Amino acid sequence: MRKIKVLLTALTLLALIPAGMAFPGGSSGGGASRIPTEAEKRSDELAASIDSSLIDANTRFAFDILQELVSEDRGKNVFISPLSILLALAMTYNGAAGDTNLAMAEALQFSGFDLEELNQSFSDLMFSVVNADEKVEISIANSIWYRLGFEAEEDFIERNKTYYSSEVRELDFSDPGAAGTINRWIEGATKGKIAKMLDVIPGDAVMYLINAIYFKGDWTHRFSEKATRDEEFNLETGGTKKVPMMHIEQQFRHARGNNLGFLRLPYGREKLVMYILLPDEGEDLDAIIAELDDESWNWLKSGLAEKEVALAMPKYRIEYGVKLINDALAKLLCNRR
């Protein structure tokens, strides 16, 4: 059987999903205000125009795939970019037909959406994310590589070029240097952070669909290096470990509920944010993650209120790793049948 491979090469410091964006409107925190650029204004307009039901569907998928991957890698740190997964699979969805189309629509929460409307919404979302803040560096790159001699459907290729700005290249997969050619594209798209994803190209592979996201940004309220000190960090398995802890006292949007604390930590002009969930002492983190969905997420966000917060969090580093999500996606599909 010939295979189409989907590669996700996200290198981000936050989960870039619509639920993690503060659209529409202006700053909702204490950061310094400034006049938005024309690109930022357009970003806000497009983000506000995206169908809220699609945003909710994307959020449901984000938590669904997170829950499956956390279940697979129980006891390990899990970092994913739901947007990267959705974009790569949305590109693939444009070439699906029959039972495959129906199965993907179920798993990806695309049922009920017109294909052109769906594509335009993802196109608008990509523009909104990339142009959300001129002080935050974000790039989204898509590409399609197909085996020399393989006849790709013209409308599939054109839709991906039009809506996802995909680079499309025919490549001799039997050439020993073919994997290196794709790896070099990925390295360029991730600003050199991911140098090698493919070792070899299997003989049954006919196409690669690749999404790469790069993110680099500073928090609106930056942590001071002078306030970082070694302290005890409570481990989920019990006990403690001494780690560098960053400290800041600042006005943040914060809430409590469902046995956890919830904090909004914004970047730049506060259109891109990190949300932090801190379980109460004795609460199981995996159990809390298992209960998250679009409704509970929106409920948590609706309770956010500005208040003075003394925040301490571990200094952390995120590194790239390879994770196959085929089994997780298959489980999502089975759970919906």
Image (cartoon, rainbow, N blue to C red):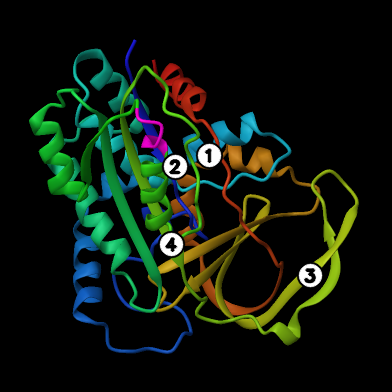
- Residue on which the image places disc 4: 191
Residue at image coords 48%, 35%: 64
Disc 4 to disc 3: CB gap under 8 Å: no
- Residue on which the image places disc 1: 66
Q: Amino acid at mark 1?
A: Leu
Disc 1 to disc 4: CB gap under 8 Å: no
| Residue 127 against residue 65 in the figure, above or below | below
Disc 2 to disc 3: CB gap under 8 Å: no
- Give the x, y percent position of residue 85: 40, 41
Residue at image coords 40%, 73%: 136
**First in sequence: mark 4 vs mark 2:** 2
Disc 1 to disc 3: CB gap under 8 Å: no
- Give the x, y percent position of residue 262: 59, 61
- Is residue 136 highlighted in magenta? no
**Seen in the image, is 321 located left or right of residue 141?**
right
> Which residues fall within the magenta stretch?
175-179
**First in sequence: mark 4 vs mark 3:** 4
Q: Give me the C-alpha separation between circle 4 and circle 3.
A: 28 Å
